[in-house]
Image (cartoon, rainbow, N blue to C red):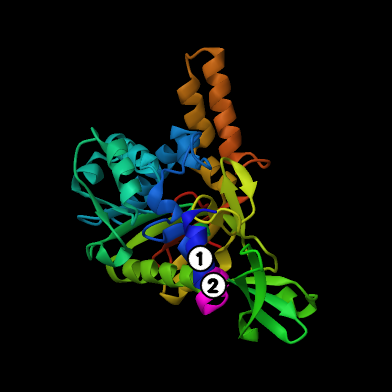
Amino acid sequence: MTALKRRIVDLIGALGPIPVSEYMALCLSDPRDGYYMTRDPFGRDGDFTTAPEISQMFGELIGAWIAATWDLLGRPASPVIAEIGPGRGTLMKDMVRTLAQAAPALRETAQFFLVETSPKLRFVQGATLEGLGGRFDWVNDVDELPQQPLLIVGNELFDAIPIRQYVKTRQGWRERMVDIDADDNLVFAVGAGSLDPALLPPDAVSAGHGAIVEIAPARAALMQTVAERIARNDGAGLFIDYGYETPALGDTLQALLKHRYDNPLAHPGEADLTTHVDFAALAEAARHAGLHTQFSTQQDFLLGLGLLQRAGRLGRDRDAAFRESITAQVERLAGPDAMGTLFKVLVIGPAGTSLPGFPAAD
């Protein structure tokens, strides 16, 4: 039993079952034993690999997107370039390296921020960015960023923000909870909390008993905070994650441990917990703040930014093994059987503006 699991068992024993949202928050962000507070989970030696760790091309294309977006917005002075949930700092490193070549004026005048709460990951990010030159600052949340034009990126951010789950019962939709059995094993249970029918997806009408729906108010609140900041100060946002375009039923809670799926209740604090992202809800939060939204698959977005052309330049005059490696990276990032269609892209910006990577507004 992990240290955090012991504490959760004791908490439930004393106070009763806890919502899935509270369980996720404890597992991921507990100051003492939370998953992201105690380890570097990324890459081959961690539990999962994100796109920036797969290939430098990912961060280079995002850097090119930032440069093109800044230009499209009229080159606002003294912008803030921020990454929220910056992992090991690899994406920020590749973005900044690209900006130094593609938009040196932006590289020189922008302020760079990483929105990160984990002391462990801040240390790793600092080591990754060492030697790039210039200044990088860390903040705990978006509200701490300067009130200046904002270009913000979040890759695999929203999937780790806790969600609430509700189960269809004979008494209606009831909140899914985490409880303990007679042997102190963590188990799922059904609580008394009900769900406002207005929050249900369209296919909930025909849902059978035991069906699960996921609601993510914390994700929508974060998106609204970011969107209101952009609406007030100018800028744009780019968010990439795995999920779905329209609301739907289903239990997407999953755990990853050493690159393998794990029981979400088995190793609290030692396995990553995520759920799929409802991009429609995020887009609605941004539009509520008066922003324009555009949506795409990662495949279409990266190809539209020139992934194949960049791969060709990297492989030029290199040996066959290197070119095969580049081809494999392209396939992982954009292939339909890899990240290409599972991962989605949402960009937000000023009303009436069609941002780079999208041929037309949605």
Within the image, what quadrant is residue 33 found in? bottom left
Q: Amino acid at mark 2?
A: Ile
Q: Residue 202 or 130: which is nearer the viewer?
A: 130
Q: Where is residue 210 drawn, in percent x and y?
A: 76, 73
Label placed on residue 12: 2
Query: Does the image show residue 158?
Result: no
Disc 1 packing (10 Å; few <14; some 14–19; many ≥20) = many
Residue sitting at 66 percent across and 73 percent down?
Answer: 189
Q: Is residue 261 left or right of residue 54?
A: right
What is the three-letter code of the residue carrying label 1? Answer: Ile
Location of the C terminus by quadrant is bottom right
Residue 202, placed above or below residue 72: below
Towards the viewer: 87 or 186? 186
Residue nearest the observer in this picture, 358 or 130: 130
Numbered range of the magenta stretch: 13-23
Relative to 128, is 184 on the left or the right? Answer: right
Check the image and name the residue furthest to the front. 183
Q: Quadrant of the N terminus?
A: bottom right
- Identify the residue position indicated by label 1 in the image: 8
Asked where in the image residue 334 lies, by quadrant, the reply is top right
Q: CA distance from mark 2 to mark 1?
A: 6 Å
Asked whether 15 falls inside the magenta stretch, the response is: yes
Is any part of residue 272 visible from this angle?
Answer: yes
Q: Are marks 2 and 1 in contact (CB under 8 Å)?
A: yes
**Residue at image x 78%, y 84%?**
170
Q: Residues within 10 Å of mark 2 (few under 14, many from 20)?
A: some
